[in-house]
Amino acid sequence: MATYKMTIAGCERELLLCPVSDTLDIAAFIMFGDVEVTEASARELLAKCPEHDILITAEAKGIPLCYEMARQEKGQYLIARKGVKVYMPDPISVDVRSITTARDQKLFLGSDDVEKLKGKRVLIVDDVISTGESLEALKKLVEKAGGNIVGMAAVLAEGDAADRDDIIFLEKLPVFPK
């Protein structure tokens, strides 16, 4: 299979090219299990991000990064879940459709997590920003919860997302037309 070689936070990686349509491939960036990239990316992103009280990401691929950023700064983080869990009191939700997911989904926060966001400076974190759909859903969820978004950060900005001036990212990731 074809790959794309790049350096991410000082770490050289080869990313597998995966089809998302008949006319487009993307390079798959998976942080799960890559402690070196996760730690280095968290460190570099924190140096670029504004002051914040709490981090939030969507389940699942952004979790290692969000956790590591919170660990490095001894802060707090929340995860917007893709399904309601029995331990989530009175959840709120928003709709989302990601480029890497075949169907529409929802993101949920329980009222206990909503309370943690109210009036707080919130930094939204993700592994890759591509179409921006996941980012928009997280923005809506944080706003619905009463949080104040101070920034949106990702390790990689894919395709046209690299031209955005409202996100913080470490590296540009091209898309691959067929």
Image (cartoon, rainbow, N blue to C red):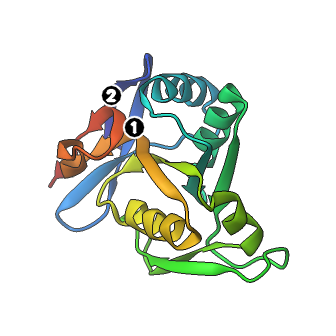
Q: Quadrant of the N terminus?
A: top left
Q: Nearer the viewer, residue 176 or 42?
A: 42
Question: How far apart in space, not on screen, are marks 1 and 2 (Cα)?
Answer: 6 Å
Instruction: Give the percent coordinates (x, y) of residue 14.
Output: 40, 30
Closer to the camera in the image, 151 or 58: 151
Q: Is residue 29 above or below residue 84?
A: above
Query: What's the amino acid at mark 2?
Result: Lys
Q: Is residue 32 visible?
A: no
Horizontal placement of 159 versus 13: left or right?
left
Question: Which amino acid does the dot numbered 1 rest on?
Answer: Leu
Label 1: element kind: strand
- Look at the picture and state if 138 lies above or below 25: below
Q: Residue at x 84, y 79 (%)?
A: 86
C-beta proximity under 8 Å, tags 1 and 2: yes
Could you tell me which quadrant the C terminus lies in? bottom left
Disc 1 residue crowd, few under 14, some 14–19, many 20+, Cα 10 Å: some
Q: Say which residue label 1 marks.
A: 15
| Residue sticking out furthest to the front | 119
Residue 106 at x, y percent in the picture? 54, 78
140, 28: nearer the viewer: 140
What residue is rendered at 52% in x and 70% in y? 141
State which tag comes first along the sequence, 1 or 2. 2
Name the residue tied to disc 2: 5
Q: Residue furthest right?
A: 87
Mark number for residue 127?
Answer: none
Q: Is residue 136 above or below residue 6?
A: below
